[in-house]
Image: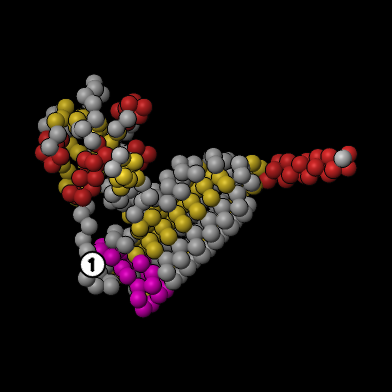
Amino acid sequence: MKFKLPQTLSGIADILNVNFIGDKNFEILGINEIHVVEKGDIVFVDHPKYYDKALNSAATTILINKEVDCPEGKSLLISDDPFRDFNKLTIHFNPFIASIVSISDSAIIGKNTIIQPNVFIGNDVKIGRNCIIHPNVSIYDNAVIGDNVTIHANTVLGADAFYYKNRPTGYDKLISGGRVVIEDNVDIGASCTIDKGVSGSTTIGKGTKIDNQVHVGHDTIIGKKCLIASQTGIAGCVIIEDEVTIWGQVGTNSGITIGKGAVILGQTGVTKSVVGGKSYFGTPISESREKLKELAEIKRFLKERKNTE
């Protein structure tokens, strides 16, 4: 999530009421999670296990819960609760603005796009040309939709990320400040849910087709010309490369990559990253030919044991 205007290290420290290490005029351009940080971003870290990863990331300001040596060319914000303070920055720079109309006055809708009854379109949404948005679709703030996109009834674009910190008092939500981006020529079925990014974008690539009742988690990137069948659940921070086919009732772990041209057969649990150009099946996942051989061997073994009893 980029700020509308550049900020300074001291200015951010004042917002959070924390100490800092570095030049008070050090430039800060936005906040992001570790997997999408860029130069100028703040990243937060609150566990020693991940200190090195955060300090050595592309982020140039680290919101951290311990005073440590500051890497050259970077700055630190010292907080007793970086998770809380990351949320403070999201709220400060991207506050929730309640809608009072079904289609926001700030929404931009392209030529020849059809909006069916009972559609909700939030603030600063951009929708391209020749789209069809069917009844009861909800498109939350800041979503970007390309040309020739069809979205069927009851689908929701931009719900919050399912991301919580377990505290003694209960689960503390990491506030989502990202968006959903749907590229050109995408079809999305009925009753799908595509969560926005925590700080970046959840993206559906050009020409991808998604069946009914599919869930896509926060910050996931789906490539071009993918086919995703119904009742598939894709976790957050997944990368699905171009031309992947995913059949029905597939589930994935977070943070994995499915390679270009892979085929994931129905009811597979994608528990790890897989390379492209192959077919996969089963839980735990393996190449479909190998999994079918395993099942055949199990069947043969059971048959032989039964015959010897």
Q: Which residues are magenta?
A: 116-138
**Kind of residue sitting beneath label 1:** Ser
The residue depicted at 87 percent of the width and 40 percent of the height is 309
Residue for badge 1: 99
Horizontal relation, residue 287 to residue 10: left or right: right
Seen in the picture, residue 19 relative to 198 is either above or below; the reply is: above
User: Tag 1: Cα neighbours inside 10 Å, few (<14), some, or many (≥20)?
Assistant: some
Seen in the picture, residue 274 relative to 72 is either above or below; the reply is: below
Task: Return the residue found at the far bottom.
Answer: 117
Residue 198: in magenta span: no
Quarter of the image for residue 276 reads top right
Quarter of the image for residue 59 reads top left
Residue 135: in magenta span: yes
Task: Return the residue found at the far front.
Answer: 309
The residue depicted at 62 percent of the width and 54 percent of the height is 266
Position in image of residue 146 (x %, y %): 39, 63
Position in image of residue 53 (x %, y %): 35, 29
**Residue 254 visible, this orientation:** yes
Task: Return the residue found at the far right.
Answer: 308
Quarter of the image for residue 44 reads top left
Between 65 and 51, the one lying in front of the other is 65
Horizontal relation, residue 116 to residue 88: left or right: right
The residue depicted at 64 percent of the width and 47 percent of the height is 281
Seen in the picture, residue 106 relative to 307 is either above or below; the reply is: below
Magenta residues: mostly which secondary structure? loop
Between 307 and 276, the one lying in front of the other is 307
**Residue 199 visible, this orientation:** no
Position in image of residue 206 (x %, y %): 46, 58
The local secondary structure at tag 1 comes to loop
Position in image of residue 17 (x %, y %): 12, 37
The residue depicted at 64 percent of the width and 46 percent of the height is 282
